[in-house]
Amino acid sequence: MGSPIVQVSHLDKYFGRLHVLKDISLEVPERQVVCLIGRSGSGKSTLLRCLNFLEEPSQGSIEVDGIKVAGGERGREHRQLVHDIRLKTGMVFQEFNLFPHMTVLDNVIEAPVIVKGMDRKAAIELAEQNLDSVGMLFKKDEYPMRLSGGQKQRVAIARALTMEPRVMLFDEPTSALDPELIGEVLNVMKKVALEGMTMLVVTHEMGFAREVADRVIVMAEGELIEDATPEDLFKAPKDPRTKALIDRYRSGEQ
Amino acid sequence: MNLFASKESGAPKTQAELLFAAAQRKERTFRFNVALTWGILLLLLVYLFSGPIKVDAEFIRENMLFIAGGVGETIRISILSIILATLLALLAALGRLSTFPPIYALSTFYVSLIRGTPLYLQIMFFFLALPQLNIRLPGLWAGVIALGLNYGAYMSEIFRAGLASVGKGQREAAAALGMTPGQTMTRVILPQALRFAIPPTGNEFIAMTKDSALVSATGFVHELMWRAVKVGRAQFHNLEALIMAAIFYWIMTIILSYIQNMIEARLSKGDR
């Protein structure tokens, strides 16, 4: 494993008086797939959203691929750094958040053309390549409204990939899906992982964590309480809260 | 097209088909009866004015063209005013989103002042009060500004609702893709908000064609209402003149409502 591509240092986040992230430090090497698990309210989504500054950290710093941004700052320079870090990261949301007034293809080429100033033709070529790899090229001229949840999420993944990010962030990408549609999205994510993308995935899908992740981090009450390979974690959880989480998953499995 | 029509005739009808046919029949009967009653009411009106209520047919014939000549002016005022109103409404709605206090204040101040005073007063203000300050606007423009300012204030709520209809997730997706707030607004939020705002804006336009009659009170704009009052008063045939103007307004609104319905149907079946 190389040097860390994501580096979180002493991150704190408050929502009003609520201390939701407590002095988090974390390093993710390139090409690693990290799953963040934990009960709702544990701070895992907030941590993920701090990485691309959808949530502004209260304190501490985030570094992605050499761009280091301190939390809690303001001003033009800070905004530029946030912009730079967002270009390094792609994000996939629970609710897909495709643009409903644009076709699938327009959704995917919008940011490369508008934000990166990519040539339209080149953007379309890249977009079609990525849509093909998530199995959605055949719907490129449809509007999102006419797609199933699983299809929307696959388009959202292609949209994020077409910005050519260094790190992909997934915020509960399958939580809004009907059970029978979860598999197709997880398969696409697995494919992205196998192609060597660095990934941070907030998820409840323990099966995915066990099979695809290189590393599983468990969060509770705004802290990282356990950080291990999936084998170690599922075989011998150290923290009782991790054990409870895994037991619940096992009982749901049968 | 129709699932049920495509079936072979003669094939036994299922329960669902029978129920569907019955529902369609009921719907057709209802519509027919509504149309019939409309026809009767219209005939009744025509009868009233051709017998029991005496109207001067000669006067109507002589002044028909003069009054009809106001339709164009009424439409012109309405179109110019709705354009101004739409711009102001959009600015006021965006102002309400501003975190910069003076902008936010300006927007709420404008809406409060305009909504807190009568339209009639505002129109008079631009025609009669401004000249006292040596500001003389051409009649048409005074009317357009008054109507535009007034409708803009009310319509800002439409645009506010339109902007609010676009979920937070859309902003977050745009931000995560690296779009600036300006790009997010123009490429993602506004196209969706405007689409949402088109049908109610159409309603406002129809209302405005009628409110434009108030501008006639100033005597400077020779639209439909002004013309009707002018010839009606001069020859003491107000009854005929106002009835004629009413018919023109009514036909205009029916046509505009029809167009409005078509636009709405198109938007709703479109790609949303």
Image (cartoon, rainbow, N blue to C red):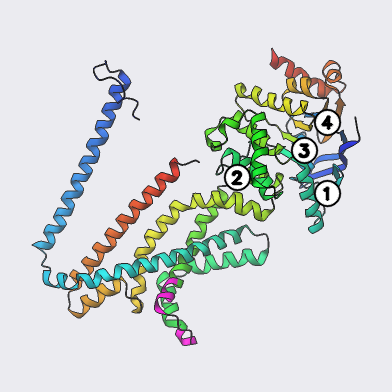
Instruction: Please name the predominant secondary structure of the magenta segment in the image.
Output: helix
Q: Which of the 4 quarters of the picture holds residue B96? A: bottom right
State which mark lies toward you, 1 or 4: 4
Q: Which mark is residue A71?
A: 1
| Mark 1 vs mark 4, CA separation in Å | 25 Å
State which mark lies toward you, 2 or 4: 4
User: Mark 3 or 4 closer to N-term?
Assistant: 4
Residue B20's spot in the image, x, y percent?
Answer: 30, 26
User: Mark 1 or 4 closer to N-term?
Assistant: 4
| Mark 3 vs mark 1, CA separation in Å | 14 Å
Asked if disc 2 and disc 4 are in contact, CB closer than 8 Å, the reply is no
Q: Which residues are magenta?
A: B131-144
Instruction: Return the residue at label 4.
Output: A31
| Mark 2 vs mark 1, CA separation in Å | 26 Å
Instruction: Return the residue at label 2.
Output: B167
- In the image, A92: left or right of B215? right
Q: Chain of mark 4?
A: A
Residue B197's spot in the image, x, y percent?
Answer: 49, 52
At label 1, counting other C-alpha atoms closer than 10 Å, the crowd grade (few under 14, some 14-19, many 20 or more) is: many
Asked whether the residues under marks 1 and 4 belong to the same chain, the reply is yes
Secondary structure found at label 1:
loop
Q: Chain of mark 2?
A: B
